[in-house]
Amino acid sequence: MGRLDGKTAVITGAAGGIGEVVAELFAKEGANIVATDMRAAAVQAVIDRIKASGGEGFAAPADITKYSDVEKAMDAAAAQYGGIDILCNIAGIADRFFTTTSIEEALWDQVYEINQKGVFYASRAALKYMAPAGSGSIVNVSSIAGVFGTLGVAYSATKAAIIGISKNIAVQFAGTGIRCNVVAPGPTKTPMADSADSDDEMMARANLHFNRHIPPCDPIDQANAMLFFASDDAKAVTGQVLIVDKGRTL
Ligand SMILES: NC(=O)c1ccc[n+]([C@@H]2O[C@H](COP(=O)([O-])OP(=O)(O)OC[C@H]3O[C@@H](n4cnc5c(N)ncnc54)[C@H](O)[C@@H]3O)[C@@H](O)[C@H]2O)c1
């Protein structure tokens, strides 16, 4: 028996990195997977692999910065499976550690649109189904950059905002069957981390006070934490932030 049997999970950013591993894990745990990402071919390939191993789901390509796209994906999920039980907001981009004095406004806007407004859009569109049903679990991905001081002003700001949005949703629905929690990953081996790690000097400046000798996490470490929040094991847990970083920020 899977921990998510019979549940429907919409996963943003599911075409690669942490999102892909979450989609595969949740499918193994019995969930119907609605995998969404702006990279249509890559997200379809993830669903093809899930189905080839006996899982259930479909790809719903969407640009998270367009509400009509996001709403279409949620509507399709609810039409196919009768509702949405789980939303994992994983889509996000990094900002190459630009600071308040160095970032171009266009990059600030892009990071804001994807990381922050995207989470707001997807949560709003999923809650359209969760609220009347009186149940659902939203699991948002922030970062240690949203909790501790680090370089990358747009990234840090949006990742902190995700915690604010999540606590707001948690308060709105506290005491009901709707919960909202946050996983805040430390460095995790994905394409995003590979591109950031390529600049050692920037990485050193971005994480001055962290224990940088501690190795990065694997995507499955983040996926397992998200599974806990998504499942009924966490039915009394809402508004919480779980740092998954092997102790890098201790
Ligand atoms: N990898 C790390 O070290 C790390 C650390 C802390 C937090 N995170 C967070 O984890 C999440 C996943 O990161 P990852 O490392 O797997 O990155 P990734 O780049 O491998 O995956 C991000 C996914 O988001 C998708 N995406 C980007 N813009 C989009 C848009 N406008 N619409 C729809 N999809 C879009 C991309 O296509 C990609 O598939 C991000 O929110 C990231 O900030 C990652």
Image: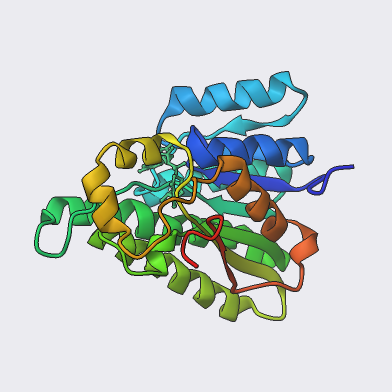
Q: Residue furthest right?
A: 1
Q: Work out which residue is located at the far front of the displayed protein and give it.
A: 213
Residue displayed at 48% across by 49% down: 71
**In which quarter of the view is residue 57 placed?**
top right
Give percent across and percent down for residue 222. Answer: 59, 49
Instruction: Determine if residue 119 is in view.
Output: yes
- Whether residue 75 appears in this view of the structure is no
Looking at the rendered structure, the number of numbered marks drawn on it comes to: 0
Q: Position of residue 122 (x, y in %)?
A: 48, 55
166 sits to left or right of 205: right
Which quarter of the rendering shows the N terminus?
top right
Q: Is residue 53 above or below residue 106?
A: above
Percent coordinates x, y for residue 212 in the rendering: 40, 53
Give the x, y percent position of residue 108: 20, 56
Q: Which residue shows up at 37% across the image and 55% down it?
A: 115
Q: Residue at x 69, y 39 (%)?
A: 25
Q: Is residue 85 left or right of residue 119?
A: right
